[in-house]
Image: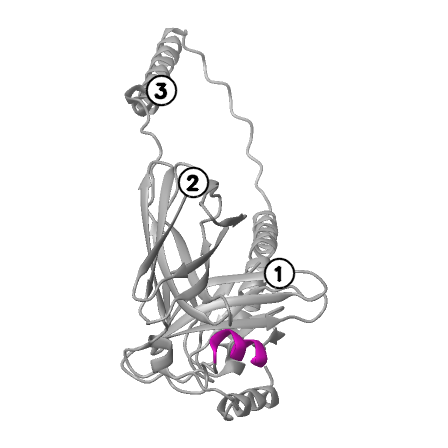
Amino acid sequence: MTILTLGVAVVQALSPVAAPAPLSVAAALDAPVQVALQTQSTGANTVYEIVLTNTSAAPVTTTVVQRLPEGSAGLVADGAKVDGDRVVWSAKVAPKAQTTLRSSGTLPVPHAAEPVTACANDAASGRLLDCAAADVASVAGPEAPWWRRWLPFVVLAAALGVLIWWGRRAWQRREARPAREPRPRKPRRDIAWWVPVGLAAIAVIVVSALALLVLAPRVATAVENAQGVRAHAWNGPQSEAELGHEASDGTAHFTIYSASCSGGKTTTCDVTASVRAGDQPVQLYRTMQRVYTSDTTWVEPDPAAVLAANGGDPFALAVPPGLERLMALRFTLPAGAQPERLELHDGAFAGGIYLNLE
């Protein structure tokens, strides 16, 4: 990145962002509907339970989107629309009441712990209300029968026994042979000094060439990574994010609940995430949240779409220490561009976190 580009990025990041309706921390915390998510697994089958709590004095109609782990099958969700690994509900929550949504599905066994997320939006305005995340417990495969566990040791012992028997028999045969008179040795011819030196030089050249052939691609990849993903990490390393799990960037702690891109004439990427401040306030900048289409090109969130999805500007005010802010971001990609990764940054010089989108 050139000095001029860096300077432009700093000016953009430090410039105040005009927002007709700033989103205060209180507004984010006082969303009328709160989401809780639980999972219960029995073998390959998992039951998901989403609890919506309406804390307001008026009914709220929500659109709830649940994202299941990849490889989920046999999805069942009463009153919901199932689209791949997404389950979408339209749920109305009465004042000061709770509504529970349930779904179930299976995952192949064995499987590691897998994240699942759920987010609720206001059905009328589209405003993001709340999100929750949970993990599907890992399931180990069936235990192998006892004889299969011992089979490798039995085979190894048998092979060792055959080897000992063969060696002993060969030694016995050799001892049984009559002694032979040694043949007269042929006169030894001295080898010129330059022959071993030349062979050693050739060996060094061949080994060096092979080492270059093997290491060159790895070195090139390392250089590309250093100049690519981490070229924009101006202060500190980057952390790789995982859906539903917190990843830290300095004093900011991000949780990505969903990140999906839809194709067509124009590719758009919708991201739902939260940022929690540590022991210091966190000031985010819209221009530092990016979807990269290559190592050197990126797009920033659409300002109008961000305002509409959040009911205000989530970047207008800093997040106070110890508090958390939820935000929905939409990125519009140029024609023909393909998303590679998402990056979220604490500030203008922060290393940030990233999530691969390929």
Say whether residue 179 is left or right of residue 57: right
Give the residue pinned by disc 2.
107
Give the residue pinned by disc 1.
262
Query: Is 189 placed above or below 148 here?
Result: below
In the rendered image, residue 342, in percent from the top left (x then y), is placed at 52, 68
Q: Earlier in the sequence, mark 1 or mark 2?
A: 2
Look at the numbered disc 1 and give the secondary structure of its residue. Answer: strand
In the rendered image, residue 146, in percent from the top left (x then y), is placed at 28, 22
- Give the residues in magenta: 303-311
What residue lies at 33% left-to-right and 76% top-to-bottom? 29
Query: Is 180 placed above or below 222 here?
Result: above
Q: Quadrant of the N terminus?
A: bottom right
Mark 3 surroundings within 10 Å by alpha-carbon count, few (fewer than 14), some (14 through 19), many (20 or more): few
What residue lies at 27% left-to-right and 78% top-to-bottom? 322
Distance between mark 1 and mark 2 Cα atoms: 25 Å
Distance between mark 3 and mark 2 Cα atoms: 35 Å
Give the residue pinned by disc 3.
155
Amino acid type, callout 3: Val
Query: Between residues 163 and 42, which one lies in front from this camera angle?
Result: 42
Look at the numbered disc 2 and give the secondary structure of its residue. Answer: loop
Say whether residue 106 is left or right of residue 292: left
Can I make out residue 226 in this image?
Answer: no
Q: In the figure, residue 109 lies in which quadrant?
A: top left
In the rendered image, residue 204, in percent from the top left (x then y), is placed at 57, 54
Q: Earlier in the sequence, mark 3 or mark 2?
A: 2
Residue 307 located within the stretch drawn in magenta: yes
Residue 226 located within the stretch drawn in magenta: no
Can I make out residue 124 in this image?
Answer: yes
**Secondary structure mostly seen in the magenta stretch:** helix
Q: Quadrant of the C terminus?
A: bottom right
Amino acid type, callout 1: Ser
